[in-house]
Image: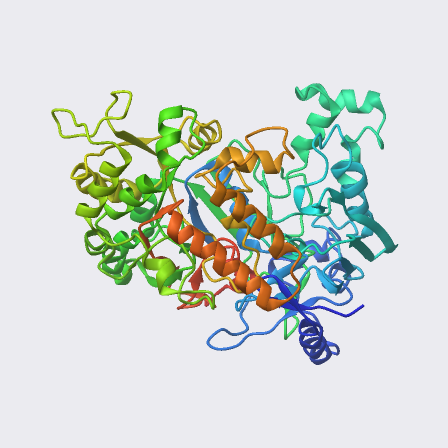
Amino acid sequence: MKGAQGSVAGRVVPGLTVALVALAWSALAHAAFIEPPVLEEQVKAGKLPPIEQRLPKTPAVVKFSGERQIGRHGGELRTLIGRSRDVRLMVVYGYSRLIGYTEDLRLEADLLEKFEVADERVFTFHLRPGHRWSDGQPFTAEDFRYWWEDCANNRELSPSGPPIEMLIDGEAAKFEVLSPTTVRFSWSKPNPFFLPRLAGASPLFVFRPAHYLKKFHIKHTSEAELNERAAGGAKNWAAMHNKQDNLYEFDNPDLPTVQPWVNVTRPPATRFRFERNPYFHRVDAEGRQLPYVDRVIMSQASPQLIAAKAGAGEVDLQARNIQLSNFPFLKEGEKRNNYRTFLWREAKGSHVVLYPNLNINDPEWRKLFRDVRVRRALSLAIDRGLINQSLYFGLATEAANTVLPESPLFKESYQSKWMDFDLRQANRLLDDVGLTRRNNERIRLLPDGRPFEIVVETAGENEEEVDVLQLIKDTWAKAGVKLFIKPSQREVFRNRIFAGETQMSVWTGLENGRPTPDASPIELAPLSQYNYQWPKWGQFHETKGQAGEKPDLAAAVRLAELNEAWNSSPAIKDRERIWHEMLAIHADQVFTIGIVSSVMQPVVVRNTLRNVPREAMYGWDPGAHFGVYRPDTFWFER
């Protein structure tokens, strides 16, 4: 078995992080740990053990480089959210993971002291001895066993069985407890998705605080006690357990966590307070326990007002719900309200994307959207140059939804095919489809006589999407296509797409715009209902054929085959070849209609907040927005 401690975008590279951690730890081994001042009174009163007893025996040591430096404890960081559910962003930003990405997208141990990988089939995890949950209880192999045996494989808690990432060709992982601090997951075939999912922005948590959740589990608690606890309204013990078990949602203040800050506000609320986790496992090179900042305040505001509030100085750190169009306004308020506005480059494959629903219930529209000539025509009828100049100051790239130039897989043809503004060719393609009849408004008519009217649905959270659609509306009309905009609410928006009720939706593009050949190409295959161009094909895969529809379009079937081939291809050349074939299919078939990419993301930062990178990539997965830059290391100068 060979050790593996780092990776580039998901592919394991042996022998990196252990050496770094060991070097940092050896320099710290004889130094005293530094107690956060805000906890000193609790330690003196005996409410908390001293820091030496709260940290693991081998804490994770954070080393700084470049402009970032060792900081100081204290302060309160304010940020804004558009919905109360966005408290889960503290799990995203906190980015405490078993294995996490570095800024250059290598994988390294975090909660784990080290990990070992053999042939991408056998994953051995070594926990940090003495590590504790936020309530002080030990974090051990039992927390992994409890999740796997008592939750993931309990049909009442998980009716569909373990998460799909834990299945390879239908084979569930073999789980073993090797010691109180060592566990192993293994498969007979490679599982290239496992480590990237553990490191994700919305991660796969393969552990749970067993000591807390056992109180709600029929295997560990008497029925009488469970009935007493269920008096609050849960219909059965499983529903009650699942309501308590929200490591990602972060809305249960009683649930212990391993994140740097702990939620102490119970919903419903519009202002959430997060206090430092006194048992957090990271320290700086001088022995200061992280996080530096004592508490984080997340306040809810209308998404449309967040940029204005940021410009008025009401936040210390903000990027969410801010667009590039807000940049001039934000720059104007910098001196007056004591903040800086950084510009980070977006890491998504495209900033704004149209998703024609190939699984729409309406048979006429389904037939049209599955005709590649229609998709190509709609793309050609968009004036991306006008959109770029009007909304993005000409700083964006007019491009398809594909990989970015920062990716070694990039080809200019993937970015430009069927992207030029060409109304003549767009009209010719629609004529070739047979849509030659028009009504009095010069709008084309479908074969059944209905006008060619496309309702593009949005999640109602981003005015910028509406601005883009308004500009598309004007040029589509010249191709005989009428566009309507329908905003809704995110859950409604998604449920309509999943149910096949939506004609077309607007969202962002590929999450990982910077992949290497060793990164999974699963986003390009019809395997997730969150791919809005083919949600029912994704449902079919995710439910193992119990819901949705089996893919029946040749190009989509081929993409699924290629993804499967990538999964079983150990050679880098084979993986690279597969990636290029999948990217070429997408470029030619225009399954999604990208508008612009490489848009700059404004990041508002309080003048006194340190260690926030001035230049960085802003991405969801991999990246976790601020997560890979470790907000637990951000600190206030005074």
Q: Quadrant of residue 151?
A: top right
The quarter of the rendered structure image containing the N terminus is: bottom right
Residue 4 percent location from the top left of the image:
71, 68
- Say which residue appears at 71% left-offset and 19% top-offset: 231
- Most foreground residue, 405 or 468: 405
- Total residue callouts: 0
Q: Is residue 4 visible in the rendered structure shown here?
A: yes
Rendered position, 243 above or below 286: above
Q: Quadrant of residue 420?
A: bottom left
Residue nearest the observer in this picture, 496 or 432: 432
* 218 displayed left or right of 244: right
Q: Residue at x 72, y 76 (%)?
A: 22
Q: Can residue 599 be seen by looking at this rendering?
A: no
Residue 579's spot in the image, x, y percent?
52, 59
Q: Dividing the picture into quarters, in which one does residue 95 lie?
A: bottom right
Q: Is residue 66 above or below residue 435?
A: below
The residue positioned farthest toward the right in the image shown: 179
In the picture, measured across the screen, residue 265 lies left or right of residue 510, that is right
x, y percent for residue 114 = 74, 66
Q: Nearer the viewer, residue 109 or 364?
A: 364
